[in-house]
Image: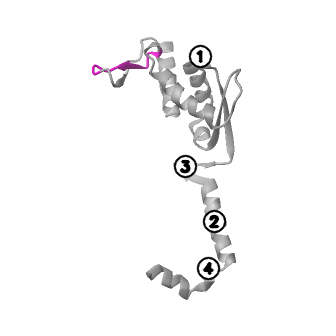
Amino acid sequence: EGHMQFLLSNKTLLNFPNKHAWFLRQLKRTQQHQYGGFTWALQTECRIVIDRSTLAASTTKILLEQSAEQLRGSRLQVLWLGEEGEGTGPMREFFSAAPAAFLDPAQGLFKLGHDGRSYHPAPAPSGTVAQQAHRGKMVAFGRLL
């Protein structure tokens, strides 16, 4: 009753020009956010094309080509190489299949825990090139999450 009484006693707050101005301010706030020193707009689109046969490698390559800010501030569209279909279906499939590909022991990023139910980060391999590749895959996996 308290806040409604205030609005009823100040009816000019409820007129259309005030509501419209409030709506435009809210719309602008949702379209442009400020986080940690960078600004992103929700209107950009990030289209990625993933090769299913090399899922982890193609995902790593694409995610490292985009900055974290570009990925956060975009409407993501996932397409599978050589396949028809777009929209939420391919995107849902990607977000299901890609983490599983990164967790595959053959990737060397994670190892299965002793309990058989959890994963733990695998040690980075020795050698500068191998360590850089391992780090790149981990960064890509982090961006995926």
Does label 4 or label 1 sit earlier along the sequence?
Answer: 4
User: Residue 87, how many percent across, how many down?
Assistant: 66, 37
Label 2 near label 4: C-beta < 8 Å? no
As drawn, the label of residue 25 is: 2
Note whether residue 140 is visible: no
Viewer-nearest of labels 2 and 1?
A: 1
Q: Nearer the viewer, mark 3 or mark 4?
A: 4
Residue 10: x, y in percent? Answer: 57, 86
Asked whether, in this view, residue 85 is left or right of residue 110, the answer is right
Residue holding disc 3: 37
* Mark closer to the chain start, 1 or 3: 3
Marks 4,1: beta carbons within 8 A: no
Q: Which residue of the protein is positioned furthest toward the bottom in this rendering?
A: 9
Question: Residue 138: x, y in percent?
Answer: 47, 25
Q: Magenta residues?
A: 107-115
Q: Tag 2, which secondary structure?
A: helix
Q: Looking at the image, tell me whether mark 3 or mark 2 is earlier in sequence order.
A: 2
Q: Which residue is mark 1?
A: 54
Residue that label 4 marks: 14
Q: Amino acid at mark 3?
A: Gly
Q: Amino acid at mark 1?
A: Thr
Q: Of the numbered discs in the image, which one, if any, rests on residue 90?
A: none
Q: Label 4: how many residues lie within 10 Å, few (<14), some (14-19) or many (20+)?
A: few
